[in-house]
Amino acid sequence: MTAHQPVRAGILITAWHSLPQALRKLDPRAQVRSPVMFVVWVGSALCTVLAVAHPTVFAWGVTAWLWATIVFANLAEAIAEGRGKAQADTLRRAKRDTLARRLTDEGEETVPAASLAVGDRVVVEAGQVIPGDGDVIEGIASVDESAITGESAPVIRESGGDRCAVTGGTTVLSDRIVVRITTKPGETFIDRMIALVEGAARQKTPNEIALSILLTVLTIIFLLAVATLQPLAAYSGRAQSLIVLTALLVCLIPTTISALLSAIGIAGMDRLVQRNVLAMSGRAVEAAGDVSTLLLDKTGTITLGNRRATDFFPTEGVARADLVAAAYHASLADETPEGRSIVELAGTVLGDPLTRSAALGDVTSSGAEVIAFSAQTRMSGIDLPDGTQIRKGAGGAVASWVRDWGGITSPQAQALADGVAGEGGTPLSVAIRRPGEAPRELGVVQLKDVVKPGMRTRFDELRRMGIRTVMITGDNPLTARSIADEAGVDDFLAEATPEDKLALIRREQAGGRLVAMTGDGTNDAPALAQADVGVAMNTGTSAAKEAGNMVDLDSDPTKLIDIVAIGKQLLITRGALTTFSIANDVAKYFAIIPAMFAGIFPGLDRLNIMRLHSPQSAMLSAVIFNALIIVTLIPLALRGVRYRPMNASSMLSRNLLVYGLGGLVAPFIGIKLIDLAVALIPGLVS
Amino acid sequence: MGEAESALATIGAIVVVLAVVYAPLGGWMARVYTAEKDWWVERAIYRLVGVDPDGEQHWKRYILSTLVLGMVGIVALWLLILVQGRLPWDAGRTGMDWHTALNTAVSFVTNTNWQSYAGETGAGYLVDMTGLAVWNFLSAAMGMAVAAAFIRGLSRSGTDRLGNFWVDLVRSVVRILLPISVVAAVVLVAGGVIQNLTDPVTVHTLTGGSQVIQGGPVASQEAIKLLGTNGGGFFNANSAHPFENPQPWTLFVEMLLLLCIPFSFPRTYALMVGDRRQERPVVGVMAVLYLLTSGLAVWAEIVASHGPTGAMEGKEQRFGVAASMLFGDATTSTSTGAVVASHDSMSALGGGVMLFNMHLGEVSPGGVGSGLYSILVLAVMAVFLAGLMVGRTPEMLGKTIGRREITWASLYVLVMPALVLVGTAVALWVPEARSALQASGPHGLSEMLYAYTSAANNNGSAFAGLASDQPFLNLTLAVAMAVGRFAPIALVLALAGDLAAQQPRPVTEGTMPTHTAVFGVLLFAVTLIVAALTFFPALALGPLAEGLR
């Protein structure tokens, strides 16, 4: 099992393993962090004392279930943390004590990795583990990064450029590199990952803090409501026992959401980790949900990254099939992605079933000579046995070849090429020279950046979610516009320099928008740091990784869209369970208030709309429901509520219906069912 | 016409007139609070008081200004009441004890107008005209000023200034309250409300008995009593007295007066934030709550009319059951506290509706200004709860509802219930206060609960069975009134200050809309649930225990 495949252990097994941890957290010092659960703790302790003093079935029943409420809350947190622990353990194995070969003025010395300092240079050779995070300053090597990314295919790391960053704990598979250490031991990427997945580094996020404040104030309101109820009850001639008042209080304060709050946060981070994204802070995850502008690099994110042949335009008097056939033959020896794509397209047009290599074999065995593409000639081509020469390449190169052989370049071919360029494509000319004839141009092949399939739908989805997409590209504005239109992005930034990017982000932010972007190069670092959500590619430089607040281990820029969804899901889950928790209270009142006072005011029994068996069973059932609902909702808290891209208005209606109305109705049914069982307990009604 | 039909006709007529008044009045108020120019009379006042009308205030300074005015007002009014016997125009009144006078001073300065005294004996014409009537205007204007400042918190960005309290206060009086009051007073005089400075006249009746016929500048005070949602009656019988409210159509006019400003404020809000759609859920929730509770009150009373006198106990023959209940519902839904019938004599559930109107936090439509800012704070709560459910940091009109904002808003929601519940609990526990109850059992509990609910909400109406004119009740109720008025004002201004300082986020498809019907439903639910969860136990032991059989 690699580090980031979801831990599939059944939740029950995880729960069982987490139980000791949950019981350890019964320590009041662990409860102080959540005022709501601390109130429950104090209530439980009070009830225990009262139950010991005056033992009844009812008193012990309530007391036991109050403690169970706390255990269940602890369990939720422990399970969430437990899922991270398994991943942390795998990571720790990668971090086993390694030795480093440090370069000194005299030569080389072997020291423990833990004693390395920033700036040290170390040598790593095939089969050795890289002792710390750093940049390759000498050499090139293939590196196995599966310990971190879970991806078994090795990656190339070389000095200079944007692929120089290496991570401690990964293994060099071939060659020898010199690495300059850039991170102190103990603060390396793996260390941070371990802390993150274990939840140790978790701090409360701004929204979580705001929510905690609301929950605390609600708790104070309910404390007041219950505390002042006693004088009112005494005046009415029915003072209540402390156990009953505690039960009422615990049922009213928002225990459900408080119990699940930290589990929701941990699980949110965990969902990112499972998608191989590391968020450096919970704040970044939350910000992802708030993002309203996405900056996406064109190449690799929106387009496949390679230009592909998309059409053929013959000059006048040339049959299209001739042009296609010529282009096909001229590209057989072209190994570049563009060349391959011409063969592929021409093959489809001509209906040629042969694979490229087979076709190549055919022509070479017939005596033809292929001319491979070279950077000097900027052409590829073929010389057929009958002496016919075909060339394909950049317009200027082909034109000068035509002129060299005494041909005349055609203004129409130039016009075709300009037309292609005008639509954002790249034109390639194709020319032919038959034996004894002057060469002439057959036409142009249109190469285009191909937009990844399904991008338009995703951008439409994003637009429905209120997120603006801006495509960033180094292309000229004409090309950029054409691709932007095709992909369906809202805006584009052409001929973008790092400064332009930074300026764009600042502009968006000044308008109150939160911006997310991806980047990998060192020159992306300022923009990554400025963006509210900056996702650095793991293949990127350490500067980029330092600047961003998330790292994508798969280096897949498209994932930005998933990250936004996860951020939103986290907030939705919190909001939905809060609403559910508060809506629950209505039913609990209808269970407990008649139970408390119907004895003295028989009319109040009309509020007992659930027709609960007895006052004792009603109160106990409400307490049991209050505890069980926490356990029931643990899977939801860990999984997150279902999230589908839709606009805020429809999402609000849907979630209000499910969690608001559902929260209102569910406890009526739940408490009634529990009451049917509780009514069977002997000696409950004393 | 039966009671139910007359109730429907009355409500229908009110809705029609309010619909007509809504746009012009709301629009006018928006102009008042955004106008650049001061009127000459206003400039004269600023010079007189020594205020710089161009000096915009930081939220803390705005709070300080309200507190200063409140404190000075309480002390000045208290002294005026205490020394009235030595001043002219005391109309032979006996005056008040020190604690009654203090209670009265706090009551009128806080727009509560709870009256521990009887108008016929407690306050002379001088106190009426230069004290109580003045504060009827100023306390109402204070609420309106705070509402205007809160709206600015939402509409402005990147500033720490909320406007100038003194300007907002003076403009509220000069441009809104005074003109309408003058017209209304004339209309009321035409309807038979008295306006004179005659001392009480003792007449001998045909049957040989004698009766004291009161005089006084009633109409001028009556108009602002209702328009400013004050409610303090010139006479002890308040709007049930024929000199305050002679006939059914004056009753109708009085209801319109007390409802018109609170119901028009959502338009003012929408215009000031520059988005007309924002008024819909606000005025919608106000109207639905108002109509629902009106219906419930009338229904409860008609169902309760099984005794020999029907449900007429404590009600005026001139008005009947339906109109009395509608008036009661309107005054408890706003912060008026005027009464046309004895709320204590209503059926348990009918009286319970009056209580619950106030437990809602007076948002249906609430007091002048205070109703708007109360419901907007609930809207902030609703935005926070539901905003998370659309997957974004909650925001209202582009302003983020974060840690500080939710702290102010939730503390705001905490204040009133805390005062009501603690006050009621302590009073029921203290023998001195308990002995003031006329009734025992659940109805007695309702009387006490009503007193603290009315005080903490600055309503002022009473379950008159409680003999509240005693030191303990006078003083604790005064505390409830003062804290119930000024703590929420301070919190709402702090909230406004934080909102004004923010840069708004652009509204996108991903923003939770606060102008839709769905948001209206949410706001309605939050308003009901917050009140229900807080007061259900108390209501169960009072009106519900008494009313459910």
Image: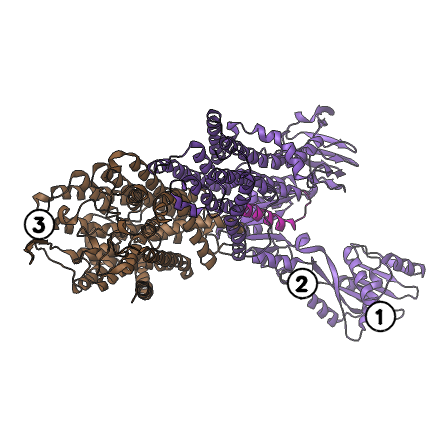
Chain colours: A purple, B brown
Q: Looking at the image, is mark 2 or mark 1 nearer the viewer?
A: 2
- Tell me the tag on residue B89: 3
Q: Are marks 3 and 1 in contact (CB under 8 Å)?
A: no
Q: Which of the 4 quarters of the picture holds residue A630?
A: top right
Whole-percent x, y for residue A511 in the image: 48, 53
- Compared across the picture, whether B213 is left or right of B416 comes to left
Q: Amino acid at mark 1?
A: Ala
Q: Is residue A559 magenta?
A: yes
Number of callouts in the render?
A: 3
Q: Residues within 10 Å of mark 1 (few under 14, many from 20)?
A: some
Nearest the camera: A251 or B160? A251
Cα gap from disc 3 to disc 1, whole angstroms: 123 Å
Q: Quadrant of the N terminus of chain B?
A: bottom left
Cα gap from disc 3 to disc 2, whole angstroms: 92 Å
Whichever of labels 2 and 1 marks the residue nearer the N terminus, that label is: 2
Q: Which residue is mark 1?
A: A438
Q: Amino acid at mark 2?
A: Gly
Provide the residue span drawn in magenta.
A553-573
- Compared across the picture, whether A159 is left or right of B535 comes to right
Q: Is residue B214 magenta?
A: no
Secondary structure under tag 3 reads: loop
Whole-percent x, y for residue B70 in the image: 24, 44
Secondary structure under tag 1 reads: loop
Nearest the camera: A279 or A566? A566
Q: The residue marked by circle 1 belongs to what chain? A: A
Cα gap from disc 2 to disc 1, whole angstroms: 32 Å
Q: Amino acid at mark 3?
A: Trp
Q: Residue at x 58, y 59 (%)?
A: A490
Q: The residue marked by circle 3 belongs to what chain? A: B
Whole-percent x, y for residue A657 in the image: 52, 54
